[in-house]
Amino acid sequence: MTTRPTTRAHTDGAVKSFPAPSQLATMTDLTQQEAREITEALNPLVADLFALYVKTKNFHWHLAGSHFYDYHRLFDKHADQIFAAIDILAERVRRVGGTTIRSISHIGHLQTIKDDNDDFVPAGEMIQRLMEDNAHLAKTQRAAHKVCERCRDVATEDTCLEGGTPAETSILLSSSSIKKHHRFGGCPPKFPLFIH
Ligand SMILES: [Fe+2]
């Protein structure tokens, strides 16, 4: 598994995420520094969720082989969970007084999950790549959770945990898929089935 940083430089390129323009300002008892740190911890997570959403849909659309139906449905379910988590986290950023993802280029600047543009990916390999990305996402979520804890933002801590659910669920679902795949003669997984 390739090692990727859990965070990137939070310059946001040309996109300024903190503070929000006065028209978008929100009431909060957090200090400016705390609100900035939370914004900078959550926006890369939102970008990674977008990247993972597209990758999961990519795999949903480009499947082939005997597991087509199961995986096609599984990937769609994962994508829906990821998409729901995006909105929750992005709105939390707005709540603390930052601004969130503006564009595809903004996502590209912040994402730490790599895009996947391969011509063809075998089904078992798709599962492996998604599990690695989900494990990476879980790590990023834990890092964001720590920032919220340090900044006394209990509500966002809870949101991070909610946002963490899709990744953890995806890993569990993927694990059961792999077991089924293996039963049908696929390759055994070479990575942990459960991420803690
Ligand atoms: Fe579909």
Image (tube, grey):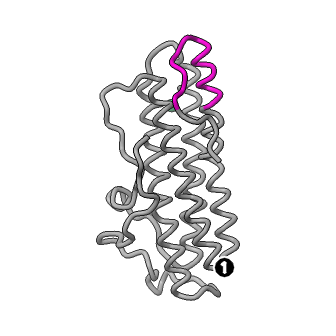
Whether ligand 1 has any atom under 8 Å from the Cβ at mark 1 is answered as no
The span shown in magenta is 175-190
The amino acid at mark 1 is Arg
User: Which residue is label 1 attached to?
Assistant: 152
Above or below residue 75? Residue 141 is below
Q: Quadrant of residue 161?
A: bottom right
Q: Residues within 10 Å of mark 1 (few under 14, many from 20)?
A: some
Task: Specify the quadrant of the image occupied by residue 188.
Answer: top right
Q: Quadrant of the N terminus?
A: top left
* Secondary structure beneath label 1: loop
Residue 134 in percent (x, y) is at 53, 44
Residue at screen point 46% across, 80% down: 20
Q: Nearer the viewer, residue 192 or 65?
A: 192
**Closer to us: 71 or 177:** 177
Is 19 one of the magenta-colored residues?
no
**Where in the figure is residue 85, as x and y percent of width and height?**
59, 54
Q: Position of residue 194 (x, y in %)?
A: 64, 39
Identify the residue shown where x is 36% and y is 44%. Answer: 115
Q: Residue at image x 41%, y 26%?
A: 62
Q: Is residue 184 magenta?
A: yes
Q: Is residue 104 left or right of residue 68?
A: left
Q: Is residue 168 above or below residue 65?
A: below
Q: Is residue 90 above or below residue 38?
A: above
- Residue 183 drawn at (x, y percent): 62, 14
Residue sitting at x 57%, y 58%: 141
